[in-house]
Image: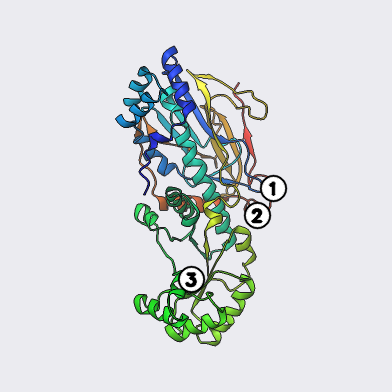
């Protein structure tokens, strides 16, 4: 796996600001940065917070080693004052934010980083890199889970992503409700169940299809999945059952008109007595293709490219903005990029039945709580030290409950307003 260290994700312009702030004495002014999005991707009604479980550990271990500092010094990117500051860097501030697996909407303050200006601003690229990627994957994956209507999903996108992004994507997809990943590194690192089948190359390796199937079954037993569309799908299914018997666990189909093929494959399997053999389909599936197969006899979906690339929205559009300096609200007034000053907190309002009705974002200390409100922020790091985090499975269950809580219109795959309205209460 990659040996990239978190500190190397620092951007050039962050070092420029730090160097200048160290020189003019503003580097240690107490600041608050917030992560939020101005708008959701086109056609989306919610975002999913993902990656915070990874991010906390990355921030905690954020260090510049001697080799990295020497590189920055040699290339003239930093002066001696900045080099010394980087060599001794440790994040000693606080990080608060929405729970991993929570939903977010435009203006939701999903992460708040507070501390000295320099120690916070140096984290900007790392924070946005992790949250934008993981949240984009999780949102796409959550839409696929909704479209699958309870059927099993396998994440199979490792070959369509950077090697480290592939592991993070597998984690985000599992958070969103996928049941398996084919990525073994994700299985080892995060305890995600793994699953997979052989590829067409294994069938082509052998003199004929039956020989390939016989080899796989001899090695793995009947509780395996045979890929049946290397040549002719009908003949492939017949060969699979002839070799493995009617107790074969599953066949996989990776090409063609999946709706028609799934129907015919089910009929053929049943006619051969393999009534319990499952049908797995794959091949450039996204949430729309999965939804289109809802009425077909498909038992499991394998999704790859679409899930690891956010299904058309490869970033969550999150930004990291300074909103407070020494307790004073600050705002950016740029056209179409204006910010709302001051540190904020958010509550999600619910009916007594548990259905979410509104998200209210207010200045810190003015939460005007109502009986069924849920406070959305929690502590992640206090004075640089991590607070106990939920497990990945707990966050996965939290997301499942959040999706249940929003009105059903918010789960539509078609474009429309955010799943719940957001009200931002300005500071007085």
Residue ID at (49%, 19%) = 327
Q: Is residue 360 left or right of residue 158?
A: right
Rounded to the nearest angstrom, the CA distance separating label 2 from label 3 is: 36 Å
The reply to whether dot 3 and dot 1 touch (C-beta < 8 Å) is: no
Image mark count: 3
Question: Is 263 situated above or below 412?
Answer: below
- Residue at disc 1, secondary structure: loop
Q: Earlier in the sequence, mark 3 or mark 1?
A: 3
Measured along the vertical axis of the image, is residue 125 above or below residue 143?
above
Disc number for residue 416: 1
Rendered residue at 56%/81% (across/down)? 234
The residue indicated by pointer 3 is 200
The quarter of the displayed image where residue 261 is located: bottom right
- Residue on which the image places disc 2: 412
Residue 180: mark: none
Nearer to us: label 2 or label 3: 3
Query: Element under label 3?
Result: helix
Tell me the crowding category of disc 2: few under 14, some 14 to 19, or many 20 or more residues within 10 angstroms, Cα based: some
Q: CA distance from mark 3 to mark 1?
A: 41 Å
Residue 349: percent from left, percent from top: 58, 41
The foreground one among 159 and 277 is 159
């Amino acid at each position: 796996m990659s040996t990239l260290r978190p500190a190397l994700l620092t951007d050039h312009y962050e070092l420029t600001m730090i160097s200048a702030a160290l020189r003019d004495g503003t580097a240690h002014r107490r600041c608050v940065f917030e992560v939020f999005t101005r708008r959701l991707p086109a056609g989306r009604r919610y975002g999913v917070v993902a990656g915070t479980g990874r991010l906390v550990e990355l921030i905690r271990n954020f260090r510049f080693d001697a080799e990295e500092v020497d590189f920055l010094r040699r290339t003239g990117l930093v002066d001696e004052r900045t080099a010394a500051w980087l060599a001794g860097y440790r994040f000693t501030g606080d990080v608060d934010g929405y729970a991993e697996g929570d939903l977010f909407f435009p203006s939701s303050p999903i992460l708040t980083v507070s501390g000295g200006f320099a120690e916070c601003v140096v984290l900007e690229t790392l924070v946005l890199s992790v949250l934008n990627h993981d949240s984009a994957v999780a949102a796409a994956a959550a839409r696929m889970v909704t479209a699958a209507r309870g059927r099993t999903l396998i994440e199979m996108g490792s070959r369509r992503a950077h090697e480290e992004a592939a592991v993070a994507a597998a984690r985000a997809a599992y958070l969103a409700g996928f049941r398996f990943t084919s990525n073994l590194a994700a299985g080892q690192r995060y305890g995600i169940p793994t699953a997979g089948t052989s590829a067409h190359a294994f069938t082509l390796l052998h003199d004929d299809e039956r020989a390939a199937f016989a080899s796989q079954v001899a090695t793995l037993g009947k509780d395996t999945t045979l890929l049946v569309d290397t040549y002719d799908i009908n003949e492939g299914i017949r060969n699979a059952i002839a070799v493995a018997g009617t107790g074969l666990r599953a066949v996989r189909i990776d090409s063609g008109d999946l709706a028609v093929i799934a129907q015919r494959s089910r009929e053929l399997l049943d006619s051969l007595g393999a009534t319990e053999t499952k049908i797995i389909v794959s091949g450039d599936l996204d949430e729309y293709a999965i939804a289109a197969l809802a009425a077909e006899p498909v038992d499991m979906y394998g999704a790859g490219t679409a899930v690891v690339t956010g299904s058309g929205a490869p970033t969550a559009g999150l930004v990291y903005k300074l909103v407070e300096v020494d307790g004073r609200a600050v705002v950016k007034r740029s056209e179409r990029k204006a910010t709302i000053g001051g540190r904020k907190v958010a509550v999600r309002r619910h009916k007594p039945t548990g259905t979410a009705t509104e998200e209210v974002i207010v200045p810190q200390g003015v939460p005007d709580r109502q009986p069924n409100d849920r406070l959305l922020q929690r502590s992640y790091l206090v004075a640089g030290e991590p607070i106990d985090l939920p497990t990945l499975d707990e966050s996965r269950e939290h997301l499942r409950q959040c999706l249940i809580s929003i009105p059903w219109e918010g789960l539509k795959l078609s474009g429309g307003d955010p799943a719940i309205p957001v009200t931002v209460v300005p500071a007085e």
